[in-house]
Structure formats: C-alpha cells, structure tokens
Image (tube, helix red, strand yellow):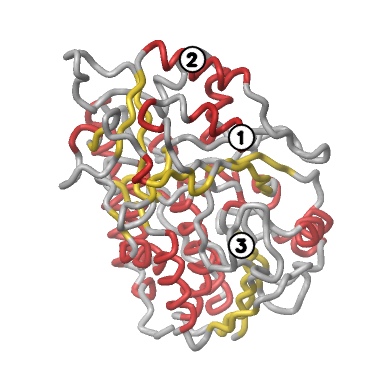
C-alpha cells in the first residue's frame, strides 16, 4: 500500500521509517534544498535548527522519560541520535551533521521509502497522508492547509542560540563543570559574571533593539523558548533564575556561590564549537556581539553562528485533530481530503523529542487504521498519549506544549519528593503491559 509523508524533518523521517518497516511504500517529500527556509542551513534531512540537545536522559526528568518510552517503542531517530551523541553530562546532545547523516543513511537504505526533493503545495491527493511539514512549512503549503482546514493562521516565534569557537574563549574566566557533577566527564564550559557585569549585561539586553517580525505575522513568543532579551525585560533577576542560574556549579574563587553563570554546550564531538545554552535571541547581529562580549570569558569570542529568529506555524489542533493525530472525520470529509494525519511541531508539540514521538504515533495510527480499520491507542499513562491528550483538548488559548510530568494522569496525591519517580514507574508499568498485549508493536519487516 502506498502512502505519502510531507516533510523530511524529525517527525516526517520517523514516520516514514515506521511505515516502511510495516510494509508500506512511502513517498517522502522534502522541499529543501530546492526551496529553503529562513532557519535551515542546507537540505539535510532531520536537521536540528535551534539547539543540538534532545535534553535529559534520566527517567526522573520529563524528556528522559519520553526518550525511554520511545526506546521501548522502537524509535529509529532515537537510535540515530544516540549514534551521534557528544559528551554533555546526562543530556542527549548530538553532533548535528552526524545526526542528519545517520538519518539520511537510514532513509536511503530503506527500499520502501522513495525520497522526493520537491515542494508539496497542497494536502489534496489520492494517497493517505501524514503532514509533517514542520513549523516552517512553505507559504504555499501553509496557505493550502489553512484554506482547507479553516481558521486563522497561527504563529509563534522561535529563536536560535549563538555558537562560539572554543579556542576563542578566555579560560582565565571560564571553567569546565557539569551541574551537580552529573556525567562521567565535565562537558560544559561555564562563564561566570559578577554582580556588576551581570547588571550591565541585563541593562544592555533590555535596551537592545530586536529584529521585528513582518506585519502579517503575529507577535507571539513561545514561553518555553523565550529570547534572552525578552527574559531580561521581565525582571532584573529573571536570567539568574533561568539560563544563567549559578546553582550546582560549586563555589567561586571567593568561597561564595557564583553570582550568575552562562553555560556553553558542545556542538560537536571534537568540542571545537560550543553553543550558549538558553541564549536563543532575535537581536541584530552587531548588537549580539557587543553584548555577549561583555562576558569576561567571551571578550574575544569568535561566533561561528549568531542567533536568529524565525516564524513557526501551527494548526489549531484542539479543533482539528483527534487523539490519534488524524483530522477529525467531519473536517476530512468537508475538505474532501484523503485520510490525513499530522505530526511534529505543526501540531503544537514543541521540542525535538516530542517531534519524534508524534512522528512515531501518527505512523502507528495510520498503519493500524489502513491495515485493520482501527488503531490501538497507547495507554493514558504513557508520555505520548498524555501529550496528545493535552494538544487536542479544547482550549481557547491554544499554545505549543512540551511534554512534562504535569500532563501524566495522577492516580493519587504523591508526595513531592516521590512524585516523579512514582509517575515514571506508573508510566513504565502501563507501557510494558500494553506492549506485551500488542505483539505487532515491533514489526519483523525490514525497512
């Protein structure tokens, strides 16, 4: 059976590989490099734009729990990420180029996947479709989606953090250490600021001129990925309790806790490049250099890449999708569309791991629906099902959402110190029972 996947990002590649291993012939479409976006560098599949980190691995963290779930469910892209891993404490941080190469190799070796390097301008067609066009869908496709589905076009703005060349960092004012000494090696570079420097840094950020979005775009910011200058404008100590928090890094030279610290995370395995953790920004390039070089360790920094801002587009998932990520049947019928699922950030599922998860889930539901006439949804206690429930629940102020422990069903009142551990145990038990009762979860088919 032939199906179509629109988009060669994280969600689209995961969905294509999952469908291929279940015996489907997949027509995978990616418009890059023939048509680029404001944020992507080239035509690489599954390209990581904002950060090179998939975040934590420990199951007592939300992202770690979601990764464990994906590993149990047989995610292909999680394996690719682990193959491209670079040292970063307990975080799953990858070399971007190696990660994309690993995904492209998996796609190329899948005989049932046919990759088309061309823009898709409409979701109409004869093939069952997964729309995983990402938050940077082309204008033509975005216009077509909203024309078919109705409602106003929704936007929020995401921003990219700067990358620094390691040998330009002044280590008289910087040191290697992971927070709380997690990980076998010290993988983060820490750049401390004293109170006087921090105050000047924040003042300059607050007064700095940002690049304004175009008039037709809503001026909305995703709360989980605010530009650093926006955080500075929210209060003098906002950054000290956010990306510049000094906790878990030992004491300074005066025997007291550091006043504030900027952390840098490796971009590649060779550690020749480091990115500024949490420092996504929409400041003008010249302004970024002026302000970031106020940091003593970065006074002579060479920036391999400066921060940038781009528009992300998402649909009104609560009004349009059911809990399997399929268009509601009345919407599908009224729009005269083939069976259509959505996946990735265009659904409002924010984050790399979440994009992979929705790619897996949309493919799972599509495969079961087309092969058996119905699907077998994940248990309510699972991370993916909990996230999807949040995305499709009616909400007048719908905004993108990362997976977090607050989304998991709480069967009882847990003590704060035990809450995450017990919720993780609840999730694992429910998922193992579901997998045991679902023998087709891991297909024997080769891709």
Residue 132: give its label: 3
Q: Is residue 425 visible?
A: no
Given residues 349 and 374, the one toward you in this image is 349
| Among numbered discs 1 and 3, the one appearing first in the sequence | 3
Q: Is residue 308 above or below residue 332?
A: above
- Circle 3 sits in a helix, a strand or a loop, which is it? loop
Is residue 418 toward the left or the right of residue 212 in the image?
Answer: left
Disc 3 versus disc 2: nearer the observer: 2
Q: Is residue 367 above or below residue 49?
A: below
Q: Which residue is mark 1?
A: 286
Q: Is residue 77 visible?
A: yes
- Circle 2 sits in a helix, a strand or a loop, which is it? helix
Which residue is pictured at 41% across the width and 64% down the height? 99
Q: Which residue is mark 2?
A: 200
Q: Is residue 75 above or below residue 296?
A: below
Across and down, in percent, residue 397 comes to 67, 32
| Among numbered discs 1 and 2, the one appearing first in the sequence | 2
Kindly indicate the quadrant of the structure image that contains residue 219.
Answer: top right
Kindly indicate the quadrant of the structure image that contains residue 338.
Answer: bottom right
């Amino acid at each position: 059976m032939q199906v179509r996947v629109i988009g060669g990002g994280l969600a689209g590649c995961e969905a294509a590989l999952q469908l291929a291993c279940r015996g489907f012939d997949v027509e995978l479409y990616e418009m890059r490099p023939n048509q680029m976006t404001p944020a992507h560098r080239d035509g690489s599949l599954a390209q990581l734009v904002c950060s090179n980190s998939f975040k934590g691995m420990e199951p007592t963290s939300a992202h770690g729990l979601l990764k464990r779930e994906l590993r149990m469910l047989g995610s292909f892209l999680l394996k690719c990420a682990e193959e491209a891993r670079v040292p970063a404490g307990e975080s799953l941080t990858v070399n971007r180029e190696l990660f994309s190469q690993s995904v492209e190799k998996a796609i190329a070796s899948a005989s049932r996947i046919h990759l088309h390097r061309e823009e898709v301008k409409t979701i109409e067609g004869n093939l069952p479709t997964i729309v995983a066009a990402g938050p940077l869908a082309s204008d033509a496709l975005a216009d077509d989606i909203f024309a078919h589905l109705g409602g106003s076009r929704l936007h929020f703005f995401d921003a990219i953090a700067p990358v620094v060349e390691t040998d330009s960092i002044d280590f008289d004012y910087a040191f290697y250490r992971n927070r709380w000494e997690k990980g076998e090696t010290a993988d983060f570079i820490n750049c401390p600021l004293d109170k006087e420097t921090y105050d000047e840094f924040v003042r300059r950020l607050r007064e700095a001129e940002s690049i304004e979005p175009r008039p037709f775009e809503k001026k909305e910011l995703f709360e989980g990925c605010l530009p650093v200058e926006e955080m500075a404008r929210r209060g003098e100590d906002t950054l000290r309790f956010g990306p510049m928090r000094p906790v878990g890094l030992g004491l300074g030279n005066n025997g007291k806790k550091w006043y504030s610290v900027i952390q840098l995370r490796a971009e590649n395995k060779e550690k020749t490049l480091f990115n500024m953790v949490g420092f996504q920004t929409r400041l003008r390039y010249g302004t970024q250099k002026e302000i970031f070089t106020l940091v003593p360790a970065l006074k002579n920094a060479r920036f391999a890449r400066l921060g940038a801002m781009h528009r992300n587009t998402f649909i009104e998932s609560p009004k349009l999708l059911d809990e399997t990520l399929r268009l509601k049947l009345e919407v599908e019928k009224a729009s005269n569309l083939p069976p259509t699922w959505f996946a990735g950030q265009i659904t409002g599922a924010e984050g790399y791991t979440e994009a992979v998860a929705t790619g897996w889930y949309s493919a799972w539901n599509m495969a079961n629906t087309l092969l058996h006439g119905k699907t077998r949804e994940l248990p309510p206690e699972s991370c993916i099902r909990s996230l999807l429930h949040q995305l499709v629940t009616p909400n007048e102020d719908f905004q993108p959402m990362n997976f977090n422990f607050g989304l998991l069903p709480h069967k009882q009142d847990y003590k704060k110190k035990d809450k995450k551990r017990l919720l993780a145990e609840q999730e694992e038990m429910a998922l193992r029972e579901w997998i045991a009762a679902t023998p087709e979860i891991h297909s024997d088919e080769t891709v």
